[in-house]
């Protein structure tokens, strides 16, 4: 009931490149691809070959090292002028997850004041590796805190994939599930399929099955009835960005589960490392929501078959208002309302 | 902005058989299939080639005529003993929509006391045709009442397909949309795609596009955020069964939209003919919810790719509690809470 997070890892740094599982091919094929250029890093993040806020943060961090190497190979100094363009492309590969820009900024800051290219490269790799290691440790801590908080919750509903495939460790929402399993608590999961790209059906079912955790797949639209059936003890989801007031941007559909859970009297938890908290965004209204390709929703086949032009609304995320959140499980413990105070406190900003 | 409901019709009786559009093939192909045996009628209803509570009611009604013809061809008298088995198979082809059993029972009752086979056949066809015609007229009336009630609502969110493909006329929920268009009111629709079988993406988009009504497709999971964005003036859905207290069984996902609409302050309407009301079911707890094939949710490809056994929970319907319903648009006008009284009144049972 524990995922083998190294067979193969979701992402890792090997010598001079990033290796990732191409998650667009799961579960049919476990293909490891190498990202050796900034173009490849940006493309992998943009097309969701690597996804999940903590994982794309770590990928972006290593992406800065790739950018430095690329600049040095081109005969540049890999100084701020050389790197400004590539770094902005990496940071902007997806707009909603704050971890990406946070991680890239951290690696860039680590190079600050260092003059020589190789020194800058060493500093960048050290910092990116620290981000990777810290995320893995944060997942373990989230698992422990979540298991303590949700010790009595046997059946968990989750959305999308906030597991080992979304982080460098055992995951956030699924980190709680694995944390429960490691603590010897009985646990089973309902995985909402997560249209349009089916990260729940493809990824969460894959990794939970591989880890031996019982999982039942449900259409997103069935979750409301499921929550009212009494079969679910808690909803636990990840997050792509948490605003200073506790509003939570996460995969589209999360808001729907939160509203249903409130009516059904089922507690709704968010599990995320503090790198997902954006104290610079006051509330959910300030979070940029990525719009994605209509063809993700309407296959080209269906599109061709329809007699007229069909518009599609395909936001990647929604924002769950803080008032619907029971608790936020972080590596430093579980935060409870009032989230504005709790978040400021845990970030040391009170 | 009016659907051409006769090109071809969703279903019709021709000489000695039922003709339907095979809706499993839409929108790629408009194929008309003939149902000449009870087996074919039961199969068409069961595999959703014909679907929508009023349409399967009419199909079941004509199915009784098919059963009579089949009994007569076999040399029987088409008397109650001959027909009991076939009629129970038709009535039970799907469990949730009350219209099916209601329509079959009505046709059977019309044969009551008639001795000769041909007389029984004539009576059955006359009654089935009346059911067909009444549903068409009910749709028109629902359209008029809905347009009057929702005159100020420009943008409608709907779920599944409760349109001309679900009835013998212009539809129920989409009947309201067409009623608005015929009344000269501006109207546009957000169609939730309706996993797992995509009746929204396949059928509602097809018929609204053909009728010239602007339509935007959204994943079911995006509806909650959409409702909170201020872009939707009303939710209008159909129904498969309405209990005596106003609880509404409809395509799975309806409940989710209703909960979200309540929080967002968007009115939530159900449009259905009175044949969908089941005064014999006190409340939603008494409604049988059909469970369908797991392969509708998880394609065999995905299933094969997963390492372990994967359970799937795939209910066809959910039950929206009456307290979330703003009004029920019927052919006899719009019912408002208290629905128990309103329903009893309109059915003449007060």
Image (tube, coloured by chain):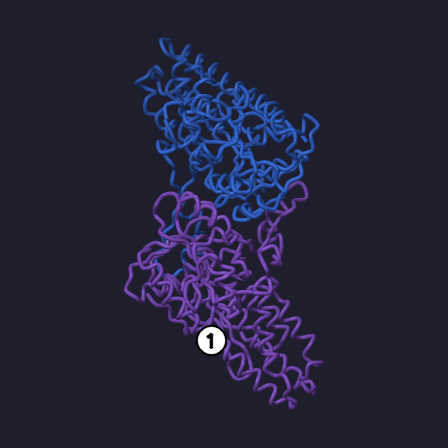
Chain colours: A purple, B blue
Q: Which residue is mark 1?
A: A134
Q: Horizontal and vertical percent for residue B154?
A: 66, 35
- Residue drawn where x is 38% and y is 41% of the image: B291
- Residue drawn where x is 60% and y is 51% of the image: A314
Dot 1 surroundings within 10 Å: few (below 14), some, or many (20 or more)?
Answer: some
In this rendering, position of residue A322 left or right of residue A209: right
Say which chain tag 1 marks: A
In the rendered view, would you say A349 is above or below B38?
A: below
- Residue drawn where x is 46% and y is 57% of the image: A337
Per the image, label 1 sits on a secondary structure element best described as helix
Count of numbered badges drawn on the protein = 1
Q: Horizontal and vertical percent for residue A284?
A: 58, 56
Q: Quadrant of the C terminus of chain B?
A: top left
In the rendered view, would you say B241 is above or below B121?
A: below
Q: Horizontal and vertical percent for residue B320?
A: 45, 36
In this rendering, position of residue B84 left or right of residue A270: left
In the rendered view, would you say A252 is above or below B76?
A: below
Q: Nearer the viewer, residue B130 or A343?
A: A343
């Amino acid at each position: 009931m524990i995922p083998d997070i190294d067979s193969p890892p979701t992402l890792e740094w090997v010598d001079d490149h990033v290796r990732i599982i191409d998650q667009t091919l799961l579960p049919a094929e476990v293909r490891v691809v190498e990202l050796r250029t900034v173009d490849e890093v940006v493309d992998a993040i943009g097309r969701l070959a690597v996804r999940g806020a903590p994982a794309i943060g770590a990928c972006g961090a290593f992406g800065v090292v790739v950018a430095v190497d690329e600049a040095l190979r081109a005969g540049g100094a890999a100084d701020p002028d050389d790197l400004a363009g590539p770094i902005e492309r990496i940071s902007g590969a997806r707009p909603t997850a704050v971890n990406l820009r946070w991680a890239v900024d951290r690696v860039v800051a680590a190079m600050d004041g260092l003059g020589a290219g190789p020194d800058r490269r060493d500093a960048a790799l050290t910092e990116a590796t620290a981000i990777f290691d810290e995320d893995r440790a944060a997942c373990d801590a989230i698992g422990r805190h979540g298991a303590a908080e949700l010790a009595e919750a046997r059946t968990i509903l989750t959305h999308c994939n906030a597991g080992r495939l979304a982080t460098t460790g055992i995951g956030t929402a699924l980190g709680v599930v694995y944390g429960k399993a490691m603590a010897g608590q009985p646990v089973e999961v309902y995985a909402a399929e997560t249209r349009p790209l089916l990260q729940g059906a493809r990824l969460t079912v894959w990794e939970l099955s591989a880890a031996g955790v019982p999982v039942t797949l449900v259409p997103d639209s069935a979750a409301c009835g499921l929550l009212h059936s009494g079969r679910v003890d808690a909803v636990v989801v990840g997050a792509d960005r948490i605003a200073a007031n506790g509003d939570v941007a996460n995969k589209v559909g999360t808001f729907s589960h939160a509203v249903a859970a409130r009516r059904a009297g089922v507690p709704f938890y968010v599990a995320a490392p503090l790198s997902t908290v954006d104290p610079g965004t006051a509330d959910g209204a300030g979070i940029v929501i990525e719009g994605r390709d209509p063809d993700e929703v309407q296959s080209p086949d269906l599109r061709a078959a329809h007699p007229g032009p069909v518009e599609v609304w395909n936001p990647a995320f929604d924002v769950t208002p803080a008032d619907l959140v029971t608790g936020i499980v972080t590596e430093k413990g579980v935060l409870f309302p009032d989230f504005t105070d709790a978040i400021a406190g845990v970030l040391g900003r009170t």
